[in-house]
Image: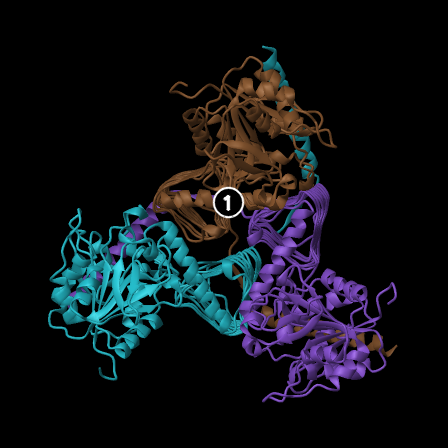
Chain colours: A brown, B purple, C cyan
Amino acid sequence: MGNSPSKLAVVVLAAGQGTRMKSRRAKVLHELCGRPMLEHVLCAAESLDPERLVVVVGRDAEEVQERFSGRCEFVLQAEQKGTGHAVLQAEPKLADFDGDVLVLYADVPLLRSESLQAMRAEKQRDGADLLILTAEAPTIPGRILRDSVGRVERVVEMQDATKEELAIAERNTGVYLLDAQLLRSCLARLEASNAQGELYLTDVVQLAVGDGKKVSASLLDDADECLGINTREELADAVAVLRGRINRRWMEEGVTIVDPACTYIDMDVEIGRDTLIEPGCQITGATRIGEGCRIKAYTTIESSQLMDDVEIGPNAHLRPNVELGKGVKIGNFVEVKNSVIGAGTKAAHLTYIGDADVGAGVNFGCGSVVVNYDGISKNRTTIGDDVFIGCNVNLLSPIVVQDHSFLAAGSTLNREVPQHALAVARAKQRNVEGWMKRRQAQKEAAQRKKEEARKDGSDE
Amino acid sequence: MGNSPSKLAVVVLAAGQGTRMKSRRAKVLHELCGRPMLEHVLCAAESLDPERLVVVVGRDAEEVQERFSGRCEFVLQAEQKGTGHAVLQAEPKLADFDGDVLVLYADVPLLRSESLQAMRAEKQRDGADLLILTAEAPTIPGRILRDSVGRVERVVEMQDATKEELAIAERNTGVYLLDAQLLRSCLARLEASNAQGELYLTDVVQLAVGDGKKVSASLLDDADECLGINTREELADAVAVLRGRINRRWMEEGVTIVDPACTYIDMDVEIGRDTLIEPGCQITGATRIGEGCRIKAYTTIESSQLMDDVEIGPNAHLRPNVELGKGVKIGNFVEVKNSVIGAGTKAAHLTYIGDADVGAGVNFGCGSVVVNYDGISKNRTTIGDDVFIGCNVNLLSPIVVQDHSFLAAGSTLNREVPQHALAVARAKQRNVEGWMKRRQAQKEAAQRKKEEARKDGSDE
Amino acid sequence: MGNSPSKLAVVVLAAGQGTRMKSRRAKVLHELCGRPMLEHVLCAAESLDPERLVVVVGRDAEEVQERFSGRCEFVLQAEQKGTGHAVLQAEPKLADFDGDVLVLYADVPLLRSESLQAMRAEKQRDGADLLILTAEAPTIPGRILRDSVGRVERVVEMQDATKEELAIAERNTGVYLLDAQLLRSCLARLEASNAQGELYLTDVVQLAVGDGKKVSASLLDDADECLGINTREELADAVAVLRGRINRRWMEEGVTIVDPACTYIDMDVEIGRDTLIEPGCQITGATRIGEGCRIKAYTTIESSQLMDDVEIGPNAHLRPNVELGKGVKIGNFVEVKNSVIGAGTKAAHLTYIGDADVGAGVNFGCGSVVVNYDGISKNRTTIGDDVFIGCNVNLLSPIVVQDHSFLAAGSTLNREVPQHALAVARAKQRNVEGWMKRRQAQKEAAQRKKEEARKDGSDE
């Protein structure tokens, strides 16, 4: 027993069919807070810096391999013959490996890196040959039987349990950390003692105990970490747990979240202190938000960067690849996409800014549009500093608007605007006096005619 | 005891005044998930295919009868004299009826059809004369006393209960299924033994037992089904339960609901597999949504049809009677109303489409409007296939836009646009150089003048 | 013991550093439902009509004093030396005071006025010298030990408690009501018997008991009232409790709230009967809403007045100082700010109305904008009755639009419009036949060129 933990290989079982999801998509690709289910498990595994990372895929192998290509090795479990059979498929990849093997499940995505690290430390401290991760999770059927000194004697399945055993709160999560040699030796002895001819990984426990090996169990503090996902309802439940975890983290870091139950922040988001998030915001991808920002209600921010003191919303939308400078204000019903916006610029209402480089101190009037698409291609627009863009102005890209210029309301502009210039494209106002009276008379005449026609019709 | 259940009559008590709702509207017309309270009960009753369906109405008789005219018979309970008195008013409608009578309550709207069908099967299987629906619902005061073989002996009201009886978890929901003859015989013997002179239907139980009839009780699996609604808070609680039931149903059917706690789907909606619903969506009326759609956050869809692979939102709104073809994309801050939209058409931002027939492959630019109202009448617009509609374009209906045409940004159009044509109505851009500098000078002069005036004023 | 309660002084401890909030802002200025934390406590204190109201401030003294200047007296606790030390700082302000002193905490903002009034009544009825507010709150460490007749003997801190004492559910909230003389006498005897050299107010209890004074305890019905806030998570929890309280109140008053868990109503809002609030609405400030209104989903209303029968939303926004007349309809993606809108006026979609006085029966077309800002100053707009404003119209303020006029779609208007006039500023539509075919040919040529270039490039 050395002081540094043994070398590690991780096997992730990801071959389950997920029939109860009723989905055309691979179960393990369904997302939780911006990451596919399997990616949560891969991230946790990668945080342990394993020598090998093997994912056992099944029916949806192609889709899964394509998504995670280069990030791990894949082995195929062509038939669904149980968890033991799945690990057996991974064995060739571990043939020459002599450290510890950690078995994880792609549909148990909430296990935290810290809990896995604790398992490793515990196995080493205990000098255990096999460490079982356990939890007080009433929905898991397998009970953990410990002897008088706390070592694991057996895993008892519900159907085989006595009344006393049924009352045991500690359950088998199926996550094991064990010596590679022990694993190989046990896998070789697994038997399909059931009607379906399946091999169960759980039987490894009994074999190890039978061999006189030291089997320990490590109890999760938070049983939610071992939630398994077989249905969309369980997916929603797991998302809710993960959301709570993410939101608590940011509140601890000094972010005010008005209603954590209705705030949707992806795993990879970062948020500065004293930023306040009103109800219903969705913040996704690798978004970075500075300090002192205010994200108002029902705003969606995707993969964007916000400097300090930005205000956005309510009901605003940043699509991917937006950079907002310090103190930018984006108001209600405004969409920004793939644009860089300078400090202090404002777009208060009903505006679309797409594919634009915008200076500082610019004012976008209500209804103004950066027209980035002409039906053939998307083009980029450049707007200088301190430009005033009037309401309902269309900027037909590619266009350059120089600093300190003024674009008159209602103008559609397609030529460069020089510095300090007024650009206008507008017809002159005409007032046609009495027009409404004449129209009213016409309307009434039409009404009369209609009624007469109806009367004639009903006379027939 | 035959093999098919007896003929059935249903009496629904809907005469309660609902004073605690503090509403001008009849209590039983308040809505849960798109249906008035009473309609939930009528739907459950109708699913049993009853020979008679009698609703006892009271103070708000007119409003209720108007809403459900033709769907059931109505009798008036002019005075509020208790549940027994209410059923007595319905008796004339059942005078010649010799099957079973089921008594339901308009303000207990969550009872599922399945539970009522189970009652009928149970009554027949037991050979019971009277079957009481019971629930482990701590807020219901009436306790069910059963004898040693499980038959009901008595309903004990809280104020009359011994300490042991108070501990009984099984309670009387007030929903009864009983032989019409037994009902008539018991109703005739009800006595107003209380200060208010009211007749209680519950007394039927004691009378039946006294007659030596067989009285059984059927326990609800889910006590939430018998939630009664007397206040708006109870209404909100019942809506939450119903919402959970609806959302679970669609998750089981293969729909991903990111946050079921914040997703609002009406009873009559249908949704295809692998459709994903982001937080905060409201989907109402008889909306039909295809497979593989994505309904983004804070989108409202009312009584519309979406083919497969439609994307909509975030923050979009379909008002009633919209049909979206396969692969249509409706983006943020877009409203569509009473329109048919062809496959693959896109309206990505800040658009209103009203009363329009739109072809396939059309692109609506940001801020474009189908102007369906001219201040006098609403007119219909026709847009062909592959039309490109520029930003902030107004289409004054009635107007026809032919296939493959291009409508220039910023144009207001009121005449037909031929195939392959460009339509434009726009003033030319003028740049007035140096305008901002002159304006700045004027502004500063004005500022100076103002300050001087202020100084003069403060000198006085 | 007289019949009317003694004179009252209130001391509010607001000097805590709030380190765990990780905020640049004073902890007691963080908001719950539209009011800073401390203001909740001040409002409760003020409802008791105290003779003196003293707030003990600390590190953030300046920021707090500025916010509440004129509303109370302030004393500074320069060093954080415990609650007893904090009250000592307030003593000079109470030197000549001979009534009761109530000690409150700025970070315990949910205590209701009714509970404080009950404390006063109870102290008087009991003839108590010191009344402790207690609660069955498992997270509070201090246990209340009562003697056989219910008088308080001691407060036992967790670390000093026996096993039996640990099981005591009644806890010390730290809120005390006591005779000023007793307070002075006890404060003088407080000792710093701990490592940090702090003085604890809790020690007053033991001193009073030692003096033979009568010490009583008053148990809160609802332990949530004594929730203390030290972190942003606790802030969010307290906000949720307060929100529930506010929403229940309005449901009791006859307002339908479809999803109370997702409805955000500030403390000072008032709402009339039979108004229905859909999910996700935020109603803030001193907003007044009439009867029979419908506030549709994801609408934000700030400090505005709505007469009866107004419809607004979904996804609409009223910024401060809006008055909507009876029956006004504000639809989706509409913003109104600082404006008065006459009865029956409609703005159905994608409109901004800022700084305007609008008559009755006006129709705002989709995309119309009241352009209140010209880049220099904000100006006011006046619109008469029965005006029809076409889609995408810009009204450049200051402008006057007289009654019964018609503003043609797509016009930008900057001159007064007389009664019954048509105002139009629009270029005429031109159809350029075959344009798209020519463009298509150009596009294909460009495409070919590009491909050839690419081919050439890859040949190199």
Q: Quick one: SS at disc 1?
A: helix
Q: Can residue C427 be seen at all in this image of the molecule?
A: no
* Rendered view: B394 above or below B2: above
Q: How many marks?
A: 1
Q: Residue C162: x, y in percent? A: 30, 54
| Residue drawn where x is 43% and y is 33% of the image | A114
| Residue at 59% over, 28% down | A206
Camera-side residue of C139 and A299: C139
> Is residue A440 shown left or right of residue C403?
right
Question: In what quadrant of the picture does the N terminus of chain C appear?
Answer: bottom left
Location of residue B139 (image quadrant): bottom right
* A260 left or right, relative to B424: left
x then y, percent, for residue A47 = 46, 27
Quadrant containing the C terminus of chain C is: top right
Q: Quadrant of residue B232?
A: bottom right
The chain under label 1 reads A
- When the figure is inspected, residue C50 is found, relative to residue C57, above or below; the finding is below
Q: For the residue carrying disc 1, how many other residues have a C-alpha within 10 Å: few (<14), some (14-19), or many (20+)?
A: some
- Side (left or right) of C78 relative to C384: left
Q: Amino acid at mark 1?
A: Val
Query: Where is residue A196 shown, x and y percent of the image?
Result: 74, 32
Residue A251 horizontal/vertical position (percent) = 39, 46
Quadrant position of residue C435: top right
Residue A54 shows in this picture: yes
- Residue drawn 66% across the image and 25% down it: A85
Residue assigned mark 1: A241
Task: Say left or right for A234 vs B11.
Answer: left
* Depth check, front residue: A138 or A56: A138
Q: Residue furthest top?
A: C460
